[in-house]
Amino acid sequence: MESEGMVIVQRFRPDRFFPAEQQQRLQALMNRWRKARDQGESLSEAERAELDSLVAAELEATAGRASAIAEDG
């Protein structure tokens, strides 16, 4: 069985889909989350909500990038 697929590699650089401000905040929250986890703590409810929102935004950005590549190709 033969199938075709496309692999998208994110270079983790700001772009029109996920700008620098969002990327920096996501990185800061992920670092905070790891530190809290390692210390047996958790993020505040507000931080968790913001992290979830940024993860969802990055997922949407990934879909946007894939769509743009497909349209250009």
Image (cartoon, rainbow, N blue to C red):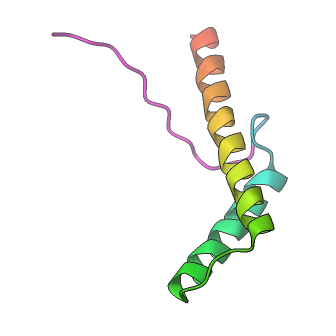
Q: Which residues are magenta?
A: 1-14
Residue 12: give x, y in percent of width and height: 62, 50
Does residue 59 belong to the magenta stretch? no
Q: Is residue 61 left or right of residue 8?
A: right
Instruction: Estimate the x, y position of residue 45 in percent, counting from the top left.
Output: 75, 68
Q: Nearer the viewer, residue 6 or 53?
A: 53
Name the quarter where the N terminus is drawn: top left
At 84% across and 55% down in the image, what residue appears? 21
Residue at 63 percent of width and 10 percent of height: 71
Q: Main secondary structure of the magenta part?
A: loop
Q: How many marks?
A: 0
Residue 57 placement: quadrant: top right
Residue appearing at x 74%, y 49% in the figure: 53
Q: Residue furthest bottom?
A: 39
At which x and y percent is residue 48?
A: 71, 63
Q: Is residue 68 above or below residue 18?
A: above
Question: Which residue is at the far right?
Answer: 21
Q: Looking at this rendering, what residue extends furthest in the front direction?
A: 45
Name above or below for residue 71 compared with residue 34.
above
Membership of 10 in magenta stretch: yes
Quarter of the picture holding the C terminus: top right
